[in-house]
Amino acid sequence: MNQPQMSEINKMGWNQNAYQAWVTRHGKPADYAEQLKVDPSSKVSFYLDEIGVIRGKRVLNLLGSKGNKAVCFALLGADVTVVDLSSENKRYAMELAEAAGVSLTYIVKDVLELTEEEMPPFDIVILEMGVLHYFVDLHPLFQKVSKFMKEKGSFIIRDYHPFISKAIRFSNGEAILDGNYFREECLEVDVAYAALLPKEMQQKLEKNIIRQWMLSEVVNALITSGLKLRKMKEDKGVHWAFPTGSPEGIAERLPGTFTICASL
């Protein structure tokens, strides 16, 4: 499968009642905006630790989904642009931004189709949580990112740890080794927000196609794309798999996410 084919399938997947799913999860944009306005720093504190002062900086949030992180950055004084395939995500994000009293630039487009002319340089480029697997080759993505960054800009990737997503299955409070970390083939999966929709609606949803990457593949793609690694971190805690706590501290003994900070 090539990238245009994957992107077209995933575009269809992400334009199926995503707006309704986010309302189910977070409430109406006006209500969610009030929550974010109370303490926007807390929602993006992880990034602020790496970025420092955000006010006045230009932030590019690639595959920024429903825009909650983007709105928080905007509330803190950043000039924020979001790029995503889903017009339904854009609808929620723009209503969220309006209710929060901030402005966003939201481009509905395949990241790899963006041009340098339409994307002036950014201080910070962010890719976060469950997005790398929408690319069949990471090199074009990272090369594109490098073109959108200022000379002293920062690129931050934060995603689910591939060991968990590729090799571990969780069932009834147990972590089960049930996969192949070295698997390379693409997979057909439910769209990420499917569980937020009614059962009868879930059954009608088109699937997504993903390609899960090993951690070394991500690092090597960054290096060969001309980006310099500044920091890498693996975070413990698979908290989403054990919402009420894990027996024998399993959640705290497994890597939950990883973060890589890079620059030109």
Image (spheres, rainbow, N blue to C red):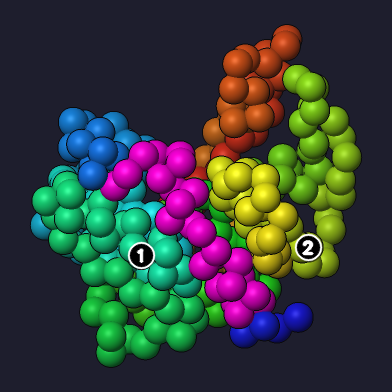
Residue 90 appearing in the image = yes
Q: Is residue 41 magenta?
A: no
Quarter of the image containing the N terminus? bottom right
The location of residue 164, given as percent across then percent down, is 72, 40
Residue 3 appearing in the image = no
Amino acid beneath label 2: Leu
- Disc 1 vs disc 2: Cβ atoms closer than 8 Å? no
Return the residue at label 2. Answer: 187
Return the residue at label 1. Answer: 90
Which residue occupies the extreme front position in the image? Answer: 200
Query: Where 204 sits versus 28, above or below?
Result: below
Front residue of this view, candidates 54 and 82: 82
The location of residue 103, given as percent across then percent down, is 16, 61
The residue located at (77%, 48%) in the rendering is 166
Amino acid beneath label 1: Lys
Asked which quadrant contains residue 53, the reply is top left
Asked which quadrant contains residue 23, the reply is top left
Secondary structure mostly seen in magenta is helix
The residue located at (32%, 36%) in the rendering is 43
Camera-nearest label, 1 or 2: 1
Which is nearer the N-term, disc 1 or disc 2? 1
Q: Is residue 19 magenta?
A: yes
Question: Magenta part of the protein: which range?
Answer: 6-29
